[in-house]
Image (cartoon, coloured by chain):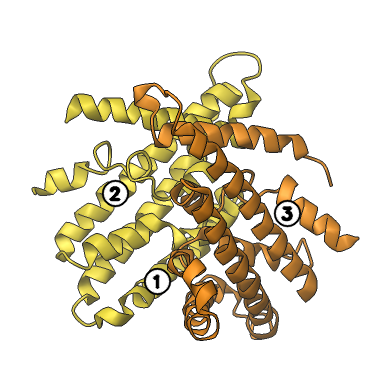
Chain colours: A orange, B yellow
Amino acid sequence: MEYIVIIIGAVFVNNIVLAQFLGICPYLGVSARVSTAIGMSGAVMFVMTLATLVTFLIYNYILTPFEITYLQTISYILVVASLVQMVEIILKKVSPALFQALGIFLPLIVTNCAILGVTILAVREDYGFHLLEGVVFAIGHALGFALTIILFAGIREHLDLVDVPKGMRGAPAALVVAGILALAFMGFANLV
Amino acid sequence: MGQLQNFSKGFVKDNPVFVLLLGLCPALGVTTSAYNGLGMGLATTFVLLSSNIVVSLIKGFIPSKVRIPSFIVVIASFVTITELVMEAFLPALYDSLGLFIPLIVVNCLVMGRAEAFASKNNTLSSIVDGLGMGLGFAFALTLLGGVREILGAGEIFGLSLFAGDGMLVFVLAPGAFIGLGYLVALNNIVKKKLY
């Protein structure tokens, strides 16, 4: 039950893109087509879950006992960067098909603030998560990212066919659409 | 390109937020007021300027294969400095910016300037570029924060402008997207008039 609450909270109430403004760059950058949006969501889900697992252990078993939590930012970004590199190498060997699908999105993920943001949020003291809860929290946020970016890509595909005023074409129109989506997601506020 | 042009390109022509669409997470996340926007903008300017200086100084020693991780470590060090200084001297701002301070590390603007400019140019040009781009970023965030604060709360930098409540939606998440959308459109028009 607790895990379901965490997932619903992460997907709908505190949606990572529309409520917490993390991962906006890929949200606007790779959402022109639904197929690329799905690929990006898969890569984010993969890396976010793994990164949270690893950084959670590092924070609780290395940084906290040695009282060097001020190194959190540096150590986390290095973990995320090397993890992405490692995942890329392993995928290439083990599952070339999956590598084909996710390959081009993996390098982009290093500078995806959604990953670093969720790994930092997962160890916040006021949540007090244990390991499994932290991982579920990451999966929930990744699902929320997938839901919003795929929805958004679907809308943008149609937006190409619409006659938008000249000054609003491209980025401005996409941002206003994102605003309206955020408005819709506000309906989920206080759900859990 | 003269240094003046190098400096001024960050404001309208190549504004990091309105034109390049870089660093949008903090641009949307912290701009509930003009003061927060300005604080975030100046913190990013400090990190950008410092990392540009260091990267332009060490560019000769770093093998190109490991340059990206090295840049990340340089940037992360300056972000940690910013974080600690802000927590000590500006605790209120530190609390309202929250998660977005450590996330300056993954602000594509900082990394982008290190890779695209500082690693190819001399230190003086890199300083000018870092200042121009950083202040352009601060300008954009303050503008967006100001628009959201005026429309959403009826005040600017905490000074009340008119009586009554504003449109609450502009302080909440949707207002950030919609406000930025219209500012990007406006910037496109201004840019077309100027250049």
> What separation in Å lies between label 1 and label 3 (alpha carbons)?
29 Å
Q: Position of residue A164 (x, y in %)?
A: 42, 24
Amino acid type indicated by mark 2: Met
Q: Tell whether label 2 touches label 3 (CB within 8 Å).
A: no
Direction from residue B195 to residue B45 in the image, left or right:
right
Direction from residue A166 to residue A172 in the image, left or right:
right
Amino acid type indicated by mark 3: Ala
Amino acid type indicated by mark 1: Ile
Tag 2, which secondary structure? Answer: helix
Tell me the tag on residue B168. Answer: none
Tag 3, which secondary structure? Answer: helix
Tell me the tag on residue B72. Answer: 1
Residue positioned 40% across, 54% down in the render:
B44
The residue to which callout 3 is attached is A10
Identify the mark nearer the N-term, 2 or 1. Answer: 1
The residue to which callout 2 is attached is B133
Tag 1, which secondary structure? Answer: helix
Quick check: can you spot residue A179?
yes
Quadrant position of the N terminus of chain A in the picture: bottom right
Residue positioned 58% across, 70% down in the render:
A47
Q: Chain of mark 3?
A: A
Q: Tell whether label 1 touches label 2 (CB within 8 Å).
A: no
Q: Is residue A192 above or below residue B186?
A: below
